[in-house]
Amino acid sequence: MTSAAMIPDVRSQRPKRADARRNYDKLIAAAREAFTEEGGSASLEEIARRAGVGIGTLYRNFPTRQDLLEAVYVEEVEAVCRTTEDLMGDPPWEALVAWLHRFLDYIATKQALSQELFNHLGRDADVFRGCRTAIYAAGEQLFVRAQASGDVRNDVSIDDVVMLVAGISKMPATVEGQIPRILDIALEGLRRQAQVVGETGH
Amino acid sequence: MTSAAMIPDVRSQRPKRADARRNYDKLIAAAREAFTEEGGSASLEEIARRAGVGIGTLYRNFPTRQDLLEAVYVEEVEAVCRTTEDLMGDPPWEALVAWLHRFLDYIATKQALSQELFNHLGRDADVFRGCRTAIYAAGEQLFVRAQASGDVRNDVSIDDVVMLVAGISKMPATVEGQIPRILDIALEGLRRQAQVVGETGH
DNA sequence: GTAACTAATGGAGGCAACCTCCACTTTACC
DNA sequence: GGTAAAGTGGAGGTTGCCTCCATTAGTTAC
């Protein structure tokens, strides 16, 4: 699994001195906690406090709030990518659907984080391109397999699918179980191949 | 067109005295501007300044930032609802698709606003229920027509569709024209009726 | 018209978060 | 162990949030 390597390494600027690296790691950990608990606008001073470092150190490592959000976000994405491995044994379509559902669940719990990022960094920031690449690398094998087996129409790309799922994850759910159902409906569109009959051409 | 009346009127608490109402309107206008220009976290003090009223007046009318966001948001939604009228003459499926595309375009430009709301008010706040109702009232005629004509499968609701579109509008676009294309793909899933052959049952 | 009654105003002030700056501490290297 | 460079942390200036209440100005009743 090489997907993690495809994320443009936010951490390439990781500090060199031992104490500095320790502080960096403590900050990421504290930030993950804080963002999870309080959403993407958790106080930076609070995060520094949790990490047990001065506010100045936080700013030295992450000049803007976005930099910190990014660093945390990237770590999370790497985690999802790692979950493909379990699924390569299952039948193509089922495996793909299962992974997408898993992906959906995962993103759903990270809404605050990713929404904050979507808002403030425009949609085509390097991080996103990188994370997208990583997700593709992870999902592509499943996707290609499903396309090869004829389950998925040929005129869509993995790109389309990932974005579709990402979008669905951000919908405001009203009814219990509605979100996964909507995913299934949308995926039916994906699957639909030259097999439909009895319609006017549109 | 009664849809506007179905929004649980945020403005029923509209102030009574003439000067108060004037200030209220100036605040909404200033807020719309500010939110559009600077996103949902524009400074409230700045908004009061733009409106030419004191910060205290802002807080009297809109005790929380959400209240202000809501009021602006509701106005915008009402505007979309009004656009259905043009389309009732077109063929059912085409009219529905066209309206959904229009709806998509519209929401896309208001991202900052709606995302802010989605984040902070949970997904089932009254406003949303109200706005959803209004949107349904607007889209429902189109939707029912399309279902009656056999273009749309019967096991989906207008609710599902609206949410699908809302979700898609929030996807980070990479390629020009990708978003509308994805909407079309998803809508194919909608359309698919008992007309597919040659598949295993799943 | 004007007096009396409120609704409405606006900004001072207290608090908290953001961020910069730099005197000091710690590490790495010789 | 000495020293240069890297890293630290928190005081303090700035700005935004929100409350409170003395003052202002529509409204109503006469």
Image (cartoon, coloured by chain):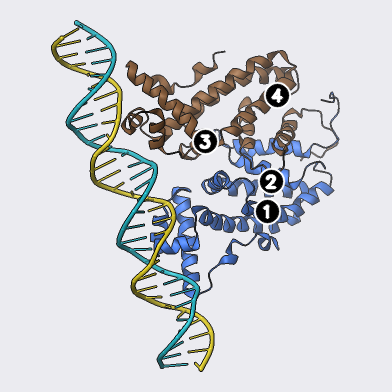
Chain colours: A brown, B blue, C cyan, D yellow
Say few, some or many: other residues with alpha carbon within 10 Å of mark 4 (under 14 / 14 to 19 / 20 or more): some
* Callouts 3 and 2 in the same chain: no
Q: x, y (%) of residue A1?
A: 57, 13
> Which tag is nearer the camera, tag 3 or tag 2?
3
Residue type of the residue flagged with mark 3 = Glu
At a point 45% along the width and 61% down the height, the residue shown is: B58
Q: Are marks 2 and 1 in contact (CB under 8 Å)?
A: yes
Residue type of the residue flagged with mark 2 = Val
At a point 56% along the width and 21% down the height, the residue shown is: A79
Q: Say whether disc 2 or disc 1 marks the residue closer to the N-terminus.
A: 1
* Callouts 4 and 2 in the same chain: no
- Calculate the distance from the C-alpha at mark 4 to the C-alpha at mark 2: 25 Å
- Tell me, yes or no, if residue B98 can be seen here: yes
What is the chain letter for disc 3?
A
Residue type of the residue flagged with mark 4 = Ala
Q: State the residue position of label 3.
A: A37
What is the chain letter for disc 4?
A
> Which tag is nearer the camera, tag 4 or tag 1?
4
Q: Which of B103 and C29 lies nearest the eye of the viewer? A: C29
